Image: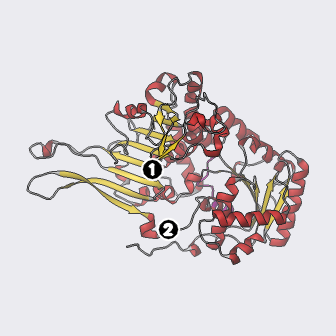
Amino acid sequence: MANEVKNDPAEAQIGDPCTMVIFGAGGDLTKRKLLPALYNLRANKLLSNEFAMIGFSNNQFSTQEFRESQSKDIREFATTKIDDEIWNWFNERIEYVQGDFGDPAAFKRLAETIEKADKQNATKGNCLFYLAIAPRFFSVVVKQLGDAGLTKEENGRWRRVIIEKPFGRDLDSAHELNTDIKKSLEENQIYRIDHYLGKETVQNLMAFRFSNGIFEPIWNSRYIDHVQITAAETVGVEERGGYYDQSGALRDMVPNHMMQLISMVAMEPPYSFDADAVRDEKAKVLHAISPIKPEEALQTAVRGQYGAGTEDGKPVPAYRTEDQVKPDSNTETYAALKLYVDNWRWARVPFYVRTGKRMKRRVTEIAIQFKRAPFTLFRHTGVEKTMPNLLVIHIQPDEGISLGFSAKIPGPTMKLDQVDMNFKYSDYFGAAPSTGYETLILDCMIGDPTLFQRDDMVEAGWRIVTPLIDFWKALPAREFPNYAAGSWGPEEADHLLERDGREWSFHNEK
């Protein structure tokens, strides 16, 4: 029976008055995530009454046509039933600017539209610019904003920019991008977004660790054997073949999503939940991870590419036959790594991470395996071996936490079996409609950068994987494709753990 505990929107801070400008407003991210997230914020009374939205793209729309398009999209992609009164309020505050990202005249029109929206909606001159665009345009748009005077903060108004991933392609390009955008922006105006950190379970990880006295004392190498982090998808590259074939699983997921999850698991307790205090501790973790050296890559990293297979009993194509993918592509759709956080807390504790497309099941989770208890006590019983405790933080699709431990099987002899305690967010707190972007957008509106990446964190993530990217590029894979769609990936990934006497946590599932 579900507990009726609910989040009270009245307890949350309402977003500041502002105009939100979405670059790339005609794209998938806007209609599938950003628009539904903004609607949910308004429905939960977290969006200021003094709010306006401006769409900016190269599509030939009038404002009225853009509003009609958004009205159609919200009904298709909303996470809840649309309340016409709420949507009409929102729709009346939408404006549109058509233009090219490199055209100064378009940004002059944007400045005029922002001024108009400010007067009509009393947004106090505050502006949030969301770059839902291809990475090659990040520097271009930020420069245009700066040249047009739209990044200048004065008379109490703020100007902030949310930048989507990928933030660079390697360490050098990430550093160059940071340098370019800082010509127009201060670091405190830049919000590098990772939508994984908008998920409740990820945010709860810090609360789970630091508010429960039974876990933090054993959160170290004395008690923990190893950590596994999995981000598996059942889908292929879908309509992103052109982008993905230039990126691959390693670039797409590891320096951002996976490194953020590692840093939240491994960070030291911050002195407060102040943004810089939290990000300082996360950055320390990333700087403590040693990059994978080329001479170690064959033993500590595995890459894979899916071939033809089945999903839900239906045949699915091989990666090399996907739209916009080269027929002889050597791009990896799977990556698994063994990493170490070289500090006192985590000395000699391996962190195994894996991510892939066309996997057996869609799941993102963090599995923390504790060391086995001594067996000596049970040597004259029916117990053959003790099983390690396994703590699993389930991030998606079912958010929750489970703990596996041993219990005696009823009967006259001493025999043990593994049992689980499971906590699901939806059972206890109820399911709240969410895209994962609501918290992050609201945090930007109130000026809280805790869940966003700083420049040093971004570059630290790339520092770890860039040597491996270079090694894989210099030595193309010869055995691709090497795992079937609908499986758990290449056999070499199993060997990565088997060499250490371990196994992936899903391999015993039916």
N-terminal label among 2 and 1 = 1
Q: Position of residue 210 (x, y in %)?
A: 43, 57
Q: Say which element carries label 1.
A: strand
Q: Residue 186 shows which numbered tag?
A: none
Q: Quadrant of the N terminus?
A: bottom left
Asked whether 288 or 424 is in front, the reply is 424
Q: Is residue 444 magenta?
A: yes
Residue depicted at x 32% and y 43%: 222
Residue 150 higher or lower than 482, as above or below: below
With 201 as the anchor, is 191 left or right in this view? Answer: right
Q: Position of residue 164 (x, y in %)?
A: 67, 48
Residue depicted at x 48% and y 59%: 204
Q: Position of residue 334 (x, y in %)?
A: 51, 37
In this view, the residue farthest toward the right is 105
The image quarter containing residue 178 is top right
Asked whether 360 or 126 is in front, the reply is 360
Residue at image mark 1: 365
* Magenta stretch bounds: 443-454
Residue at image mark 2: 431
Residue type, mark 2 in image: Ala
Residue type, mark 1 in image: Glu
Q: State how the image is colored.
A: secondary structure
Q: Position of residue 108 (x, y in %)?
A: 90, 54
Residue depicted at x 51% and y 60%: 200
Q: Is residue 359 magenta?
A: no
Residue 227 higher or lower than 171, as above or below: below
Q: Say which element carries label 2.
A: loop
Residue depicted at x 48% and y 50%: 362
In this view, the residue farthest toward the bottom is 85
